[in-house]
Amino acid sequence: MRYLTAGESHGPQLTTIIEGIPAQLELTTEQINKELKRRQGGHGRGRRMQIETDTVEIASGVRHGKTLGSPIALIVKNDDWKHWTKIMGADPLPKDINPDEIKRKITRPRPGHADLVGGIKYGHRDLRNVLERSSARETTVRVAVGAVAKVLLNELGIHIVSHVTEIGGVIANPETTMNKTVHEIRQIIENDPCYCVDQDASIKMVEAIDAAKKAGDSIGGVVEVIVEGVPAGIGSYVHYDRKLDGKLAAAMMSINAFKGVEFGLGFEMAHLKGSEVHDEILWNPEEGYTRRTNHLGGLEGGMSTGMPIVVRGVMKPIPTLYKPLQSVDIDTKEPFKASVERSDSCAVPAASVVAEHVVAFEIAKAIVEHFHSDQLGQLKDQINEMRKIMKEF
């Protein structure tokens, strides 16, 4: 299973093509649009979320509400495109127009962005050619892809949720998620402005976001993704590129502004003894093999253990600031304050939604690669058989 995305932040549309989704899966635009709306929410978002509402068009691969097994093409149109047609159009400029006179040319790279390095790499003297594609706007269609993956996972009894555990130094109490299912966590965060389970912490997070916005600054945070129902043995220990935790880590680190990832206790393990880290194995006739704890986040030896998969990612503060940092104009080499593009003061809640969906895709991909998966019914039968083997081993 694989996908590609295409499109620029202020281009006419974002496009993705997914290959490998089994046939006979019920899929509608409403299922995808619900997830796109979540990505646009959360306290701290900028003006663009007020300008346009993302909705998807299914252009191929689905007929009368069911997947065909052929590639699925999804399109999300940019409602703001009408204001950018001359600036971002694909057709050559008329000969009597100087490209340097086009409004919105950027020659002042923003610290923390791809602007300068991307310009050097691809030879662009107008850094808009870099920032338009490197923008987090691209994650819109990655959420759409993950939404399709989630529909598949739900059919297989696998459920996933993300939530915010920290923003701007305000840390949620981990006990607020203890003994809660994915569905219980979902019910709480859907009504919370920061997508946080700890409502006391959420109030302080809102205050921190508002203070950063007032100061023209930005703040980052930490998000957590939990996946329930993944059978044991997904992934492999036999080679580095087949390890499930390696694939999940790569997916998390591919999200714009993410700078760290951990599983289970994560970096805390550096301060603990082995006896405090590893999960003791238990067995009972009803469930089969389980673990007394889940310190390793549902992964051992690059494979799922059957316990919930728990992965966290840290997002740096957004580098586009309304009190911009110093930069250098690439044309004049003179020092300037970096250009300001429309931006958010905090996008951690939205990033948690992106994290949820990139993880969903990697889990779905690993499962589809593990089993014969041309048809949904075949895949369901094999998953159920694997769960039976797990219990009786």
Image: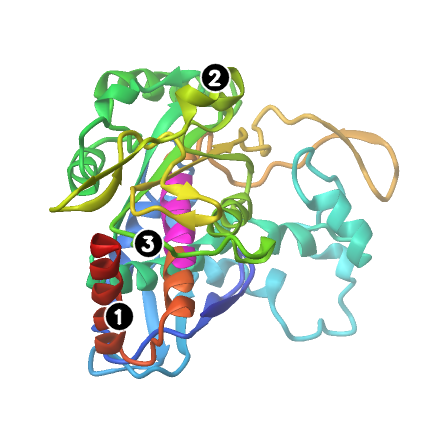
How crowded pointer 3 is (Cα within 10 Å; few <14, some 14-19, many 20+) is rated as many
- Left or right of residue 323, residue 109 in this image: right
Identify residue for label 2: 272
Identify residue for label 1: 382
Q: Nearer the viewer, mark 2 or mark 3?
A: 2
Q: Is residue 47 visible?
A: no
Q: Are marks 2 and 1 in contact (CB under 8 Å)?
A: no
Per the image, label 1 sits on a secondary structure element best described as: helix
Q: Point out residue 82 in the picture as x, y percentages from the top left corner.
A: 47, 63
Earlier residue among tags 3 and 1: 3
**Quadrant in the picture for residue 328:** top right
Q: Nearer the viewer, residue 310 or 176?
A: 310
How crowded pointer 2 is (Cα within 10 Å; few <14, some 14-19, many 20+) is rated as few
How crowded pointer 1 is (Cα within 10 Å; few <14, some 14-19, many 20+) is rated as some
Identify residue for label 3: 36
The magenta segment: 350-362
